[in-house]
Image (cartoon, rainbow, N blue to C red):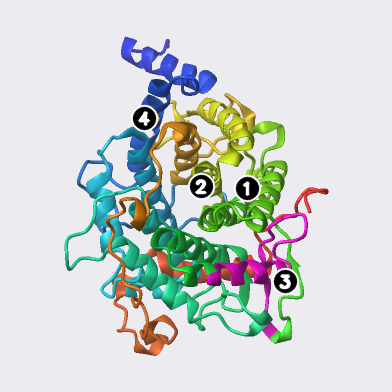
Amino acid sequence: MMARFSLSALVLALSVWNYGVAGIDLDIESEDSIKSVVKTIAADMFQYYSATPGVIISNIPGQLPGPPPTPAVTNAGYFWWEAGAMFGALIDYWYYTGDETYNNATFEALQHQAGPKHNYFPDNQTLGMGNDDQGFWAMSAMTAAELGFRDADDGEPQWVALVQAVYNMQLAKIDDVCNGGLRWQALEFLNGFDYKNSISNGCFFNIASRLALYTGNSSYADEAEVIWQWMEGVGFIDPKYNVFDGAGVKNGANCTEIYKAQFSYNAGVFLHGAAAMYKFTNGSAIWQTRLQGLLTQTIAIFFPDGICYEVACEKALVHCTIDMLSYKAYLTRWMAASTKWAPFMLDSVMPVLKTSAVAAAKQCSGSPADRPNGRMCGLSWSEGEVWDGTSGVGQEMAAMQVIQANLIQSAREPLTNATGGTSKGDPGAGTGDPAGTDPTVLEPLTTGDKAGAGILTAVVAAIILSGLVWVSLPDGNV
């Protein structure tokens, strides 16, 4: 019996097939085209959070749906920190395009997840709280201050004060193990507490550098310098400016066996912070040397053939965790943002952002079962128009960030207290709070709290530390 097809079904099939071949049509030389494309991608990304305007899928402002998936399984759920990163990306979206569509939801998320003590340490995330997790929310709050995002009313958490609270809490956690540095996890009972890593220290370095620049207070810059020197001294940043993942401290290991995987967001977070320090020090020679060295090696490692590539997992996507699928978003956003503070970077940064953006748009050609629209973005930008079969918040965010980053030269300058920034600070925020280091002072968690995304961070930490999800880097990358 011959199958029967309606005309509309045929048109849909042809449309999906066409997207699978061509990806999203982007004219990288046209500002209007860039804005139109990122508007589409932002809408697709936001549907993971709110499929219907005003209706949050997870029912918790600022939290993406969970629980998190196993490695290489997309769309199953997301960790708390990635939601913080996503709302930072939506502030960038507003900054680049002027579109206020997501501003109210972003404001609500960043306020709600600040928690009752206004420090991005909400009780329902303590079972999986990493110092890097807290740091990502703080960096988004810092972006809100720098870009002139809507200020909170008096009595509500203020952006700069929130960042200062995180900074003060984390400064108190730097210990003498390995002669300094932050641990990965925030609380002693969590798997990963016995691991010191680049991203936790990179987030701290980043917010310290940016607080110095925004407030003009050199004490923040002093601590940023300490962290940079510690990173070099312990070997997490080597003489070639490779940034390695971290090392264990258990049983006297004392950071002697460095896990030399390289992830793009580790390079990016230090690059951005170093640019802030370059600006804060009025273009000092030492920070120019550090910034140039880091930029040169970052492009060499993560932009083969001029297209951003996640070297630790992209060759075999099955090795990419849900987190890794988003890392390109942060590297590309920070590379672009860094050029505002260190314009000498433009000639190196813009060509690879342009080629990566064009490739990313072509990879937005997917039709997964849950979103068969023919334009969902994959991770493998180097594969061109052939969709790699992955989709999710991280992939959408990465494509959006790298494409809109090409508007950085026409975007307005970031603000500081001295140049029109209006966000209020509180230098003492976050001090004297024992909950940051002593879990016994926390209120008992409810069953609903335990079901939050944070609880499973400990599980993933255990997997990571056992080495089951990591892959070796190609020869020549270190």
What is the CA distance from the residue labelled 1 to the residue labelled 4?
Answer: 27 Å
Q: What residue would you read off at disc 4? A: 40
Q: What residue would you read off at disc 3? A: 233
Of the image marks 1 and 4, the number of the one nearer the N terminus = 4
In the displayed structure, 230 sits above or below 90; it is: below
Q: Is residue 79 visible?
A: no
In the displayed structure, 310 sits above or below 388; it is: below
Location of residue 467 in the rendering, given as x and y in whole percent from the top left corner: 69, 65
Q: Hey, which residue is sitting farthest right in the picture?
A: 475
Q: Quadrant of residue 314?
A: top right
Location of residue 51 in the rendering, given as x and y in whole percent from the top left corner: 28, 41
Circle 2 sits in a helix, a strand or a loop, which is it? helix
Q: What residue would you read off at disc 2? A: 341
Q: In this rendering, would 238 be left or right of 37?
A: right
Does the residue at mark 3 contact the one at mark 4 (Cβ under 8 Å)?
Answer: no
The span picked out in magenta is 222-250
Label 3: how many Cα within 10 Å (few below 14, some 14–19, many 20+): some
Location of residue 70 in the rendering, given as x and y in whole percent from the top left corner: 53, 56
What is the CA distance from the residue labelled 1 to the residue labelled 3?
Answer: 34 Å
Query: Which sits in the foreground, 240 or 258?
Result: 240
Of the image marks 2 and 4, the number of the one nearer the N terminus = 4
Q: Which residue is painted at 67% across and 47% down in the image?
A: 298
Residue type beneath disc 3:
Gly
